[in-house]
């Protein structure tokens, strides 16, 4: 399968790239800093560009089967409209290039998933993460109405731990306290979701 990965230089995205290469997929990455992937020279096609530019995204999307976005804001709690701008760019490019499959990484607590959050989680979502979650929610409304074969993925708190290979997945999951999941396991689900129609037009909440 031919995959275009956005956010490949981030921690979750890098796990995803490594999984795809190991599985034998043809991997293209769009990155503002392609040099960050120099150790993968010859194993991925790195395209320099910005995920919020439809022109750049369309250039990288030519000939792809699936687009997977692992875009994030690292430790920042300000969205700076990243997710809304990227969603618009990706949707426009997908329609231009005839690519229909999109797997999009979000965060648990965005949109309707907030209602299932524990009291501890809700405090964080209403305070520290308020700005970034608001921007993610707007971007997802656009994705849902795009006509693409989307999957929206909602992991709980991300950790740097190793992949366990087993985690909970569902359109809704019960929450207590502040559950977490490793970025490596999130990448595993993103990869699997891109290779099956099971999660098309569905939300996937994932947690340990």
Image (spheres, rainbow, N blue to C red):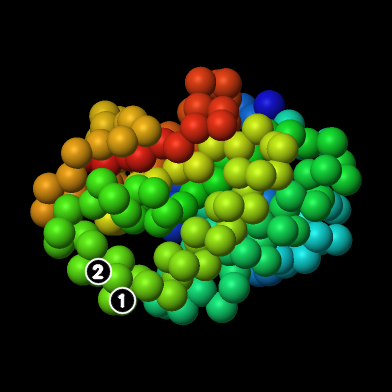
**Can the viewer see residue 24?**
yes
Residue 159 position in % (x across, y down) = 28, 55
Q: Which mark is residue 128?
A: 1
Q: Are marks 2 and 1 in contact (CB under 8 Å)?
A: yes
**Can the viewer see residue 14?**
no
Circle 1 Cα neighbour tier, 10 Å, few/some/many (<14 / 14–19 / ≥20): few
Circle 2 Cα neighbour tier, 10 Å, few/some/many (<14 / 14–19 / ≥20): few
Judging depth in this view, the residue of 114 and 73 nearest the camera is 114
Which secondary structure lies at badge 1?
loop
Which residue lies at the image location 49% right of the left edge and 32% below the top edge?
202
Which residue lies at the image location 80% right of the left edge and 60% below the top edge?
54
What residue is shown with label 2? 124
Residue farthest to the left, as pictured: 177
Which secondary structure lies at badge 2?
helix
Judge whether 20 appears above or below 33 on screen.
above
Whole-angstrom CA distance, mark 2 to mark 1, is 6 Å
Judge whether 82 appears above or below 67 on screen.
below
Which residue lies at the image location 74% right of the left edge and 50% below the top edge?
91
In this picture, residue 183 sits left or right of residue 161: right
């Amino acid at each position: 399968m031919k995959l275009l990965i956005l956010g490949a230089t981030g921690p979750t995205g890098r796990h995803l790239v490594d999984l795809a290469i190991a599985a034998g997929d043809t991997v293209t990455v769009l990155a503002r800093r392609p040099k960050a992937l120099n150790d993968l020279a010859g194993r991925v096609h790195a395209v320099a560009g910005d995920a919020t530019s439809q022109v750049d995204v369309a250039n990288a999307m030519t000939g792809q089967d699936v687009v997977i976005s692992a875009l994030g804001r690292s430790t920042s709690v300000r969205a700076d409209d990243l997710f809304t701008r990227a969603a618009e760019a990706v949707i426009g490019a997908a329609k231009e290039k005839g690519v229909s499959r999109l797997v999009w990484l979000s965060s648990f607590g965005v949109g309707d998933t907030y209602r299932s959050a524990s009291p501890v989680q809700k405090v964080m979502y209403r305070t520290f993460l308020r700005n970034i979650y608001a921007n993610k929610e707007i971007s997802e409304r656009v994705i849902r109405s795009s006509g693409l074969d989307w999957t929206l993925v909602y992991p709980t708190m991300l950790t740097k731990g190793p992949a366990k290979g087993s985690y909970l997945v569902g359109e809704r999951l019960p929450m207590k306290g502040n559950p977490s999941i490793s970025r490596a396991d999130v990448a595993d689900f993103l990869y699997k979701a891109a290779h099956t129609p099971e999660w098309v037009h569905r939300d996937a909440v994932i947690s340990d």
